[in-house]
Amino acid sequence: MDLKDRVGTTHQSRFRVERRHTVPALPFDRPAVTEMPEVLATPMLVAMMEAACIEHIAGLVAGPVLSLGRRVEIEHLAATPVGFEVEFTTRLVSAEGRQLAFDITASDGIEAIARGRHDRVVVDRDRFVARLADKAGRIPG
């Protein structure tokens, strides 16, 4: 798979912030977390960025592909309350064989809320699933 000719392409994705995406909704039953304001949690922001890159790849490659995240670097610049729609713009900045790198920006319609970089690798789905099943069968007791 050669995507070098697709470097520079961009893709937009949108996600609406729901309560389940906020800091108090994180799966940690600790007052320091549950008493935080209901704003988009950084881990959920990262997940949305990752999903935006997966969608971008799906638009570049014919047929189903499986890509795995390798690295994420972000700056979470501003808080976003529940109800806002966040727009992510991904730009493919590098394609070296199966290794893809994206620059990402995010805005909530009022201001820029994040920017970052995400690296993904495209893998063979059947091989990955087989290796994962093998590993799952060896759960330490």
Image (spheres, helix red, strand yellow):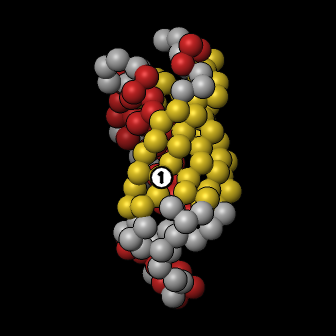
At a point 50% along the width and 48% down the height, the residue shown is 88
Q: Position of residue 106 (x, y in %)?
A: 56, 53
- As drawn, the residue found furthest toward the front would be 110
Q: Position of residue 95 (x, y in %)?
A: 60, 20
* Residue 86 vs residue 73, the one in the foreground: 86
Relative to 18, is 87 above or below? above
Relative to 10, is 5 above or below? above
| Quadrant of the image occupied by residue 128 | top left
At a point 63% along the width and 17% down the height, the residue shown is 96
Q: Is residue 45 left or right of residue 58?
A: right
Relative to 54, is 13 above or below? below
- Residue linked to disc 1: 87
Residue type at numbered disc 1: Glu
Q: Position of residue 5 (x, y in %)?
A: 56, 13
Q: Residues within 10 Å of mark 1 (few under 14, many from 20)?
A: many
The reply to whether residue 69 is in sight is no
* Residue 38 vs residue 34, the one in the foreground: 38
Q: Secondary structure at mark 1?
A: strand
Q: Position of residue 41 (x, y in %)?
A: 52, 67
The reply to whether residue 18 is in sight is yes
